[in-house]
Amino acid sequence: MNDFFNAAIWEKAWKDESDLKIDRMKKNGIDPTRSFDHKAKTFNEQSFSEEGRKRTKRIMNWLEGQGVRFENSSILDIGAATGVFSVPFAERGAIVTAVETSPPQIELLQENISSFAEQQVKIVPVPFEDIDVKAHGWNQVFDLVFVSMSPVIHNWESVEKVLQCARKFCYISMPVSPAEHSLVNEIWPIITGQPYHTKHMEMGYLLHLLYLKGYAFESLITREAKTTEVSREAALQEAMTWLGHHRLPVDERNRNIIADYLEQAYPSGKVVIHEGGRFGKVLIRLQDQNMYTREI
């Protein structure tokens, strides 16, 4: 039971699990920071659709309910993608620094921020992992550091670096469990011969370590779902990417198996995919932490 309160053990467990996952992906030829490139256009369209904007607004309303203010605030958006949050942050009057390295997403981000005044949204096309926080002058300078569903967060060391940039608040969202994905449920038994079972994800490490290290925070877990229709070719590409994420061989044999299945199951050429899952959001109050430290 004492290990339950031993932060060092939790840090090591998270790092070991994350390192194993990243190593498996790289061996399968998948760069975690670039695995989303092929979906940039579709993601952008979904993010700025009416339903996508509603999802974004719900999260921003939750942040406001916790005391976050956007007008005249400085925000660091790490893994900004096409600007799904950078754009509404700027629309609310914030000055945004958007860290993004994916070329197709940067191109769309540039289009999406073209109507704003110069410097209201600044794009930093450098991996956050390569940024020296002190050299950049980012040490505790942002009112809000925002990290939504980004591979930047993969162990406690990465969390500490993100927290280092925040003056008041830091928001991090992560999956609580593997995404529910109809195509995964269909293909897993064909590839493995076993039914698909979900398991818990890294959000538990984050929340427990924040608790053990004395941070003030609020957390929220929601269930979300969406349905999309894609071509067989796009579904095949998504399935192959998914294989790498789940530590299965990304090889010609599995590609052929999946391609044959899609051709038989979806003769129209259109694949309907149902996605969903539980997602965790946490808002860390650095202001409270700093106040407590000063009082000591």
Image: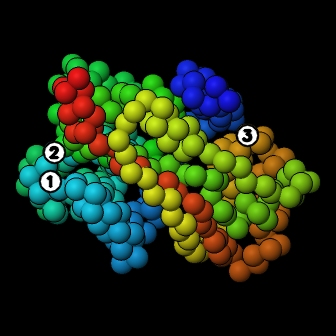
Q: Residue 225, located in which quarter of the rendered image? A: bottom right
Mark pair 2, 1: CA separation: 6 Å
- Residue type at numbered disc 1: Ala
* Badge 3 or badge 2: first in the primary sequence: 2
For residue 74, the mark is: 2
Decide: is 20 above or below 198: above
Q: Nearer the viewer, mark 1 or mark 3?
A: 1
> For the point 61% across and 67% down, which residue is it?
275
- Residue type at numbered disc 2: Ser
Residue 266, x across and y down, in percent: 75, 75
> For the point 53% across and 68% down, which residue is it?
224
For residue 247, the mark is: 3
Residue at mark 1: 94
> For the point 22% across and 54% down, which residue is it?
68
* Badge 2 or badge 1: first in the primary sequence: 2
Colouring scheme, one of rainbow, by chain, secondary structure, one colour? rainbow
Residue 104, x across and y down, in percent: 39, 50
Q: Is residue 23 left or right of residue 76?
A: right
* Badge 1 or badge 3: first in the primary sequence: 1
Q: Helix or strand or loop: what does disc 2 sit on?
A: strand
> For the point 66% across and 62% down, which residue is it?
180
Query: Which of 169/137 is in front?
Result: 169
